[in-house]
Image (spheres, rainbow, N blue to C red):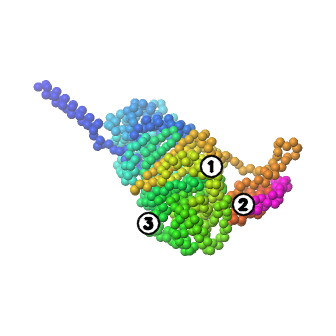
C-alpha cells in the first residue's frame, strides 16, 4: 500500500516538471514584441539581435574612437556608456542576458530636449526574475536603488551618486525597458495598454521588407523629424519640411566598419506627399550626368531623375488634380505667366528638358551670399532649348520695363529671366529660392541662379575641368550607388563646413573650428531613392576618413578679423633708408562679386556701415569710377575701369588724405 502514495507523488512531481518545461520553453502566449513598448513619438529606432557583440564591435571601430574624443559626442553617448557600465558592474547579469534583441529609440520629450529609450527582450529569463532580483540587490557606494509604482507597474530607480543621474527601469512581460528620462518609461507603460508604432501599417510595411539582416536595423519616423532637428537649430528648412510632410517611414539594414556606413532599405510616402515626389515614384529612373558641370566644391547636390521630363510632368499634373485647391492655384499661376508673356510653358519651356534636374549649393565664397544656389536642367536638344529660351527672353523684353543686355563671360552668354516665382509655380516650394534668375547654357545644360557669380563659378570650374566628374573622391563615392535613380543627394562636408563658417559670428567660428575634426571626418554623405512599386528603394552611405587626411585634400577657412591694408608696402630687402612703394601690390584690386548685373554701381561696406569701396558697372562688368576708403571714411584708392580693366591714372592716399602713390594703366 505504500507504493501507491509514492507513485502519486512522483506522478504529481512529473506533471509539475512537465508544466514548468512547457511554461519555460514552449508557452509564448505571455510574450509581447519589443516595438509595442516604444513610445509613439520615436524619431528613429535602432534594432539589433546581438547587442553585446555589436556594441563591442562599434566601440573598437576607428570612427567611434575618433568621435569619443569630442566633448559633445561623448556627452551624447554618455547615457549609452553609463547603461553599459551599470550592467557590467554585475557581470553575472550581463552573462545571463546574453545576446538578445535590443531596441534603442530617440524621443523629444520637451522643447529643445531629447533622450534615448531602451528595450531588451529577456524572453524566458523574465519568468525566472533573474535580472529583477539582481537589480533589486544591486547597491554600492556609487549607486542607490529605489522603486515606485506607475499604473500597477514597478519602476526601479538606480541613482548614480557620482554623475547625479537616475536610470529608470521597468519589467513588462518579457521585456526590460529603461531610460534616463522617467517620462519615457511611463509612456512605455502606457503603450503596453495601447501600442502605437507596432500597429502602424506604414511601419509594418517597412519592417516586413527589412527583416533581420546585418548587424543593425534603423527606422526613421518622419512625423517627428522637425521636432528633433529643432533641438539643434530653430531655423526652418524647406527641404526638411518637404521631407516631413511627404514621407512616413524609412527602414534600413546596415553594417559598420572602419571607413563606411552602408545602409540599404525602403521608404514609404504619405498620401499627401509633395506632388513632385509622388510623380517621381511613377516616372521611372534616370542617369545622373550633371556632375559633368557641377563644380568639385559643390557643397550639396540634389538630383531628380526620370525616364523623361515630359512623363514626369504629366504625372505631376495628374497628382495635382487630386487636390482641387492646389490644382487651381497651379493653373492660376501658370496661366498668369502665359498670359503676361504670351508664351506656352509646355512648348516653350518644358518640351526641351531631358531626364535630370538638380539643385546645387556652392560655397559662400563665390559671392559672399548665403544662397549660392543653382538650378540645372539637362536639355534633350540644346539648340531647341536655346531657341525657346531666346523666344521667352524676347517676350520678357516686350512686356517688362527692365532692360538687360546679354553679358558674355568666357564665351558663354549670361541672360536675365525676370519672371518672379517662375520655378515655384512650376515645381513647388522647394524651388522657391530660384526667383528672377540669370541663366546660361553650358554644353547640354541650362544653369539658372539668382546670383550671376554662381554661374560664373560653374563656367570657370567647367573650363578648368574642376568638376565632380573629375573629382576622384566623388567618383569613388558615386560608384557605390546605382547609376540610375529618382532622387540622389550628395553632401560634400568639408565644403559645407566652409559655407557655414562664412556666416557665423566670431565666437561661433571659434567653436566650429574647435569641432572641425568631428565635422569633416565624414567627408562624403549620400542618399538615394529609386521607385519600387509603392515604395522607394533607399540607400544611405556615410564615408569616414581620418581628418588629417581630409585636410590634405581641402582648403579650410581660418578666423580673420577685419584689417586695414596699408597703402605703402615696404621692401625689407632694400638698402635704402626710405620705404619702397610697391605699386603693383597697392593697385592689385581683389576680385569682386556684384550680384546684380542690371545695377549701375556695386558697393561694399565695412562692419561699421561705412563704405569700403564702390565701382560703377555696365552689364555686370566694372566700367567707370572706382573708389576705395579707409574705415574712417578717408579716400584710400581712386581710379577708373574700362570694360573690366584698369585704365588711366590710379592714385593711392594715406589715412590722412595725403597722396602716396600713383600709377598709369
Q: Visible in this render: residue 58?
A: yes
Give the residue displayed 55% in from the left and 48% down from the top: 475
Q: Which residue is mark 2?
A: 603
Q: Which mark is residue 318?
A: 3
Disc 1 element: helix
Question: In the image, residue 81 lies at what x, y percent?
Answer: 48, 37
Does residue 51 appear left or right of residue 543 in this picture?
A: left
The part of the chain drawn in magenta is 638-665
* In magenta stretch: residue 649: yes
Who comes first in sequence, dot 1 or dot 2? 1
Residue 341 picture quarter: bottom right
Q: Which residue is mark 1?
A: 498
- Mark 3 closeness class: few <14, some 14–19, many ≥20 residues within 10 Å: some
Give the residue displayed 21% in from the left and 34% down from the top: 15
Does residue 308 appear left or right of residue 12 in this picture?
A: right
3D distance between C-alphas at marks 3 and 1:
42 Å
The residue lying toward the viewer, choosing from 240 and 428, is 428
Disc 3 element: helix
Label 1 with label 2: CB-CB less than 8 Å: no
Question: In the image, residue 61 lies at what x, y percent?
Answer: 51, 37
- Mark 1 closeness class: few <14, some 14–19, many ≥20 residues within 10 Å: some
* In magenta stretch: residue 104: no
Who comes first in sequence, dot 3 or dot 2? 3
Q: Quadrant of the N terminus?
A: top left
Amino acid at each position: 500500500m505504500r507504493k501507491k502514495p509514492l507513485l502519486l507523488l512522483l506522478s504529481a512531481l512529473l506533471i509539475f516538471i512537465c508544466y514548468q518545461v512547457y511554461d519555460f520553453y514552449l508557452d509564448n502566449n505571455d510574450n509581447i514584441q519589443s516595438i509595442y513598448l516604444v513610445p509613439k513619438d520615436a524619431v528613429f529606432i535602432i534594432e539589433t539581435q546581438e547587442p553585446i557583440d555589436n556594441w563591442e564591435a562599434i566601440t573598437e571601430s576607428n570612427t567611434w574612437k575618433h568621435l569619443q574624443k569630442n566633448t559633445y559626442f561623448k556627452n551624447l553617448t554618455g547615457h549609452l556608456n553609463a547603461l553599459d557600465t551599470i550592467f557590467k558592474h554585475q557581470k553575472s547579469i550581463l552573462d545571463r542576458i546574453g545576446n538578445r534583441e535590443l531596441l534603442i529609440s530617440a524621443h523629444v520629450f520637451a522643447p529643445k530636449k531629447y533622450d534615448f529609450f531602451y528595450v531588451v527582450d529577456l524572453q524566458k529569463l523574465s519568468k525566472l526574475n533573474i535580472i529583477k532580483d539582481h537589480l533589486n540587490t544591486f547597491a554600492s557606494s556609487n549607486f542607490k536603488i529605489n522603486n515606485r509604482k506607475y499604473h500597477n507597474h514597478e519602476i526601479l530607480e538606480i541613482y548614480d551618486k557620482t554623475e547625479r543621474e537616475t536610470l529608470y527601469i521597468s519589467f513588462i512581460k518579457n521585456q526590460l525597458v529603461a531610460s534616463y528620462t522617467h517620462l519615457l518609461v511611463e509612456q512605455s507603460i502606457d503603450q503596453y495598454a495601447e501600442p502605437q508604432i507596432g500597429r502602424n501599417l506604414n511601419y509594418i510595411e517597412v519592417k516586413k521588407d527589412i527583416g533581420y539582416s546585418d548587424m543593425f536595423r534603423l527606422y526613421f519616423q518622419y512625423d517627428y523629424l522637425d521636432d528633433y532637428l529643432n533641438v539643434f537649430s530653430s531655423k526652418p528648412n524647406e527641404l526638411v519640411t518637404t521631407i516631413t510632410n511627404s514621407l512616413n517611414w524609412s527602414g534600413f539594414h546596415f553594417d559598420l566598419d572602419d571607413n563606411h556606413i552602408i545602409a540599404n532599405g525602403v521608404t514609404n510616402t504619405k498620401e499627401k506627399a509633395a506632388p513632385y515626389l509622388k510623380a517621381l515614384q511613377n516616372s521611372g529612373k534616370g542617369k545622373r550626368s550633371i556632375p559633368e558641370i557641377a563644380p568639385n566644391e559643390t557643397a550639396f547636390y540634389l538630383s531628380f531623375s526620370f525616364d523623361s521630363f515630359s512623363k514626369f510632368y504629366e504625372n505631376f499634373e495628374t497628382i495635382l488634380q487630386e487636390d482641387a485647391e492646389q490644382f487651381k492655384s497651379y493653373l492660376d499661376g501658370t496661366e498668369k505667366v502665359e498670359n503676361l508673356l504670351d508664351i506656352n510653358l509646355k512648348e516653350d519651356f518644358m518640351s526641351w528638358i531631358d531626364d535630370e534636374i538638380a539643385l546645387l549649393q556652392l560655397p559662400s565664397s563665390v559671392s559672399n551670399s548665403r544662397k549660392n544656389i543653382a538650378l540645372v536642367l539637362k536639355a534633350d536638344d540644346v539648340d531647341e532649348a536655346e531657341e525657346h529660351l531666346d523666344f521667352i527672353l524676347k517676350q520678357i523684353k516686350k512686356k517688362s520695363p527692365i532692360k538687360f543686355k546679354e553679358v558674355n563671360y568666357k564665351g558663354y552668354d549670361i541672360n536675365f529671366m525676370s519672371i518672379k516665382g517662375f520655378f515655384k509655380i512650376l515645381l513647388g516650394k522647394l524651388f522657391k529660392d530660384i526667383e528672377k534668375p540669370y541663366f546660361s547654357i553650358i554644353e547640354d545644360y541650362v544653369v539658372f541662379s539668382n546670383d550671376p557669380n554662381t554661374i560664373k563659378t560653374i563656367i570657370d570650374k567647367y573650363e578648368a575641368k574642376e568638376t565632380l566628374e573629375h573629382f576622384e573622391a566623388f567618383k569613388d563615392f558615386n560608384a557605390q550607388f546605382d547609376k540610375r535613380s529618382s532622387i540622389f543627394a550628395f553632401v560634400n562636408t568639408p565644403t559645407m563646413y566652409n559655407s557655414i563658417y562664412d556666416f557665423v559670428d566670431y565666437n561661433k567660428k571659434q567653436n566650429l573650428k574647435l569641432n572641425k575634426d568631428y565635422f569633416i571626418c565624414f567627408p562624403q554623405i549620400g542618399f538615394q531613392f529609386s521607385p519600387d512599386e509603392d515604395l522607394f528603394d533607399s540607400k544611405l552611405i556615410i564615408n569616414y576618413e581620418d581628418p588629417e587626411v581630409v585636410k590634405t585634400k581641402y582648403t579650410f577657412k581660418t578666423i580673420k578679423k577685419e584689417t586695414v591694408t596699408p597703402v605703402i608696402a615696404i621692401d625689407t630687402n632694400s638698402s635704402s633708408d626710405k620705404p619702397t612703394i610697391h605699386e603693383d601690390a597697392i593697385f592689385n584690386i581683389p576680385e569682386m562679386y556684384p550680384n546684380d548685373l542690371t545695377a549701375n554701381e556695386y558697393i561694399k561696406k565695412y562692419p561699421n556701415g561705412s563704405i569700403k569701396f564702390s565701382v560703377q558697372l555696365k552689364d555686370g562688368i566694372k566700367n567707370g569710377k572706382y573708389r576705395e576708403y579707409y574705415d574712417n571714411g578717408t579716400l584710400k584708392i581712386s581710379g577708373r575701369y574700362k570694360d573690366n580693366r584698369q585704365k588711366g591714372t590710379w592714385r593711392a592716399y594715406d589715412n590722412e588724405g595725403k597722396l602716396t602713390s600713383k600709377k598709369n594703366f
